[in-house]
Amino acid sequence: MEPKKNPKADIGRNSGLYFVIGLALTMALVYGALEWKTYDEVNDYDISMNVDEELDEEVPMTEQIKTPPPPPPPAAPEIIEVVEDEEEVEETVIESTETSQEEEIIEVEDVEVEEEVEDVDVPFAVIEDVPVFPGCENESDKRACFQKMMQKHISKNFRYPEIAQEMGIQGRVSVMFTIQKDGSIGNVRMRGPDKNLEKEAARIISKLPKMTPGKQRGRPVRVPFSIPITFKLQ
């Protein structure tokens, strides 16, 4: 069957060619638009350089060092006048100390050197001659007699403080005192649980009689002594 339409009148027969040509023109226009460059037509460039501003160096602030003034010159030495010796000076003659056979030698008597007595305290337990309590003069064991008489004196003069009884205070008071070189009692010290008990212990010790002082090597010395006084409520 023959076609009714003339093939020359078919407008779609060259459509592929037209597409390729159009695509090529479009790409050429896009490429030309991307690569298009423009330049400013201004030719007055400032090529000068301000050298003065770049070479302007900033000088740091420095502190002026003050040098101390030079020391004053030394004073001129005094003029020493030389005075001629007019007075005659007697020369000292040193005689020889060597003896000759003709001289008599006088013997010097021996000089007694007194021993320096040291003022020391000798404890009651080690002293040679213990202090003698009045009434123990004729006892053979004066140390034991001293202890016995001390206990008797405390028992005789003991009095429990009323305020301590009311407050229920009891305990032991350690009493320390010194029998002086003249036999008197001194340097009394107490240490106990209450001031009232210490005060009563001091009163008892203050009533001690004067004793015969203790002796070490035949000389009177101070003798420290300590004894406890117990306060106990019944």
Image (cartoon, grey):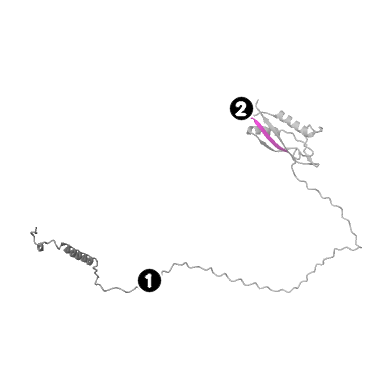
| Disc 1/disc 2 C-alpha distance (Å) | 105 Å
Name the residue nearer the viewer: 21 or 63. 21
Position of residue 54 in the picture relative to residue 134 (left or right) = left
Of the residues shown, which amino acid type is indicated by label 2?
Glu
Of the residues shown, which amino acid type is indicated by label 1?
Glu
Percent x, y for residue 70? 55, 70
Q: Quadrant of residue 216?
A: top right
Name the residue nearer the viewer: 57 or 204. 57
Q: Residue at x 37, y 71 (%)?
A: 54
Residue that carries the numbered disc 2 in the rendered image: 166
Residues shaded magenta: 164-178
Percent x, y for residue 101? 91, 63
**How many C-alpha atoms fall within 10 Å of the one at disc 2: few (<14), some, or many (≥20)?**
few
Q: Disc 2 on helix, strand or loop?
A: helix
Percent x, y for residue 147? 75, 32
**Which numbered tag is attached to residue 54?**
1
Name the residue nearer the viewer: 140 or 86. 140
> In this rendering, which labeled residue sits more in front, label 1 or label 2?
1
Residue 166 in magenta? Answer: yes
